[in-house]
Each structure stands twice: as C-alpha cells, then as structure tokens.
Image (cartoon, rainbow, N blue to C red):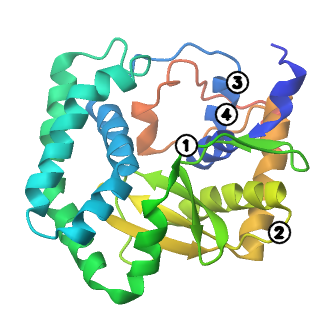
Amino acid sequence: MSLNKNEHNTNVSDIALYLKCPRKVYYSKRSQKKRTNDDVSYVEHLFLKEFGLRYPQLLEHFSSKADGMIDTIQSVFNEIHVELNIIYASELEGVSESTILEAIDNLQACIEDVSCNMGEMLKDTHSMPLVRALYGMELEPVLYGSKMKVSGMPAGMVNFEGSPAPVIIKTGKCPEYGIWADDRLHLAAFSMLVQDIHNKPIDGGIVIYSRSGCIRPSKIRANDRRQVLGVCSNIKKIKEGFLPERKQTPLCNDCEFLESCDVKSSLASKFF
C-alpha cells in the first residue's frame, strides 16, 4: 500500500510509537484494522494524560493554599470523569461505561501519592523555578521543524532556565530517579524540534509522571540526539515498506494491531 509523499515526514508521535514497538509504526501508517480499545488500561492512560495537563493549575493553586490537597485533587478527578467522554469522544467510541468506571476506580489509589509528591515538591526551594515555569505552560502547541522535517505536539511548552522547554506526560510508573530511557528519547525528539524552530541549542525538557505526581526535568545529551536520528531513519524505512521483525513481549496481548501482526518476518525485516 502506497503512502502520500507528505506522510514520509516524521511526527514525534511516530517516534514514541516506534519506541513502544517498531511494527506499530508500520501498521498505523497503513490503516490496518485496530481492535476496539475497550480495555481498562487504555482508559486509565487517557484519564492520566488529561490529569497531567491539569498539573500546572494544581501547582499554582497549592503554592498559595497548601491545605486540602487531597480534596482538591479528588475534585479534579471528579471533573475529569465528567468531561472525559467529551474531550476524548473519538478515542472512547465503543468503550463501555463499565470499563470507564473500573479505570477511574482503579486510579483513586493514585490520589494520595500525587498529593504527597506534589506537597514535597512545593516544600523544596530548589524545585520552585520548575514549579513557576509550569504555571505558564502553553498546552499542546503544534510545532513544525522545517530543517528536520519533523512535527509534533508536546503536552506543553514552558520557559525554563531561560530557554523554551518541551513538556511531555507519561502515564506509567515513575522511576525512582531521573526518567526512563525511552522517555528521554521521546523528550529529546521534542527538544530537537524546538531547537530546529528557534535555531538555538535546547538542552532540556520536563517529564510529568501523572500517575504519581512526580515532575522531572532532564538534560538532553548528544547521544540522545544521535539515537533519535537513528530512529527517524528507521521510521523512514518502515514508511517505505519495510516490516520490522516482530519481538514478542507481554504487551503484545493488549496491542490494538494484534490481529494484523503476523509472526512471520520477511527476509528484508531480518536485515532491518
């Protein structure tokens, strides 16, 4: 199946998808039939993504009124519950109300951790520049870098330590220290896009781990950029028709492309 010429441009979402599984890039670009996302983990992901987008308003509120944090977070949870089907109407099409309710019920356990970690962050004077930067976060700006021919929409953009910095939201488990390796590459891709747009070095970004209330600034290294360029090269090959070799993992069972994903690998994929 051929692809339109402009589809050979890379979106940062392609990079994030590749980091999960290269075959997802292949199938998503060829309109392969997806399974209905009527599963609890998918709804949890959407809910936590929306929750992460509301971190700036929570931090600004708590910086002036630290008491009642759990009640305030619960109020935001309730608000998202009401609005989720409206905001993510397409994503939640075909998802049952019982699945949504189960996901929200599961996430109630996050409230105490989020309250605790946000509270600790607000007590740490070293974290205040980061907190203040998030107050003015521009939500989901659409970015395009003409040199790299890469586009993307980070969760937000802030001015941090004198430079524009991308913000991404992750809905999984937060590492004890720093950020996960794949999250670093996802963040690096956005920093390179911002660098292309502003024509100046962009050496950092911010990851919001919305499940736990942890916010981690991270520096971007030369090797991170090198790896992103390698991923972009591989994505280009996939869009031109290469089917990457399948790597069986426990996550395969929940993949929306499971029915399309053939265990057989072409000879070309063995050299990919």
Assess whether mark 3 and mark 2 are in contact (beta carbons under 8 angstroms): no
Q: Which residue is mark 3?
A: 29
Determine the image quadrant of residue 135. bottom left
Distance from disc 2 to disc 3, alpha carbons, whole Å, reads 32 Å
Around disc 1, counting alpha carbons within 10 Å, would you say few (fewer than 14), some (14 to 19), or many (20 or more)? Answer: some
Which quadrant is home to the N terminus?
top right
Distance from disc 4 to disc 2, alpha carbons, whole Å, reads 30 Å
Label 3 secondary element:
loop
Q: Name the residue located 34 percent from the left edge and 49 percent from the top edge.
A: 54
Label 1 secondary element:
loop
For residue 39, say whether it is visible: no
Assess whether mark 4 and mark 3 are in contact (beta carbons under 8 angstroms): yes
Instruction: Tell me the tag on residue 140.
Output: 1
Q: Which residue is mark 2?
A: 200
The kind of residue on which mark 2 rests is Lys
Disc on the earlier residue, 2 or 3: 3
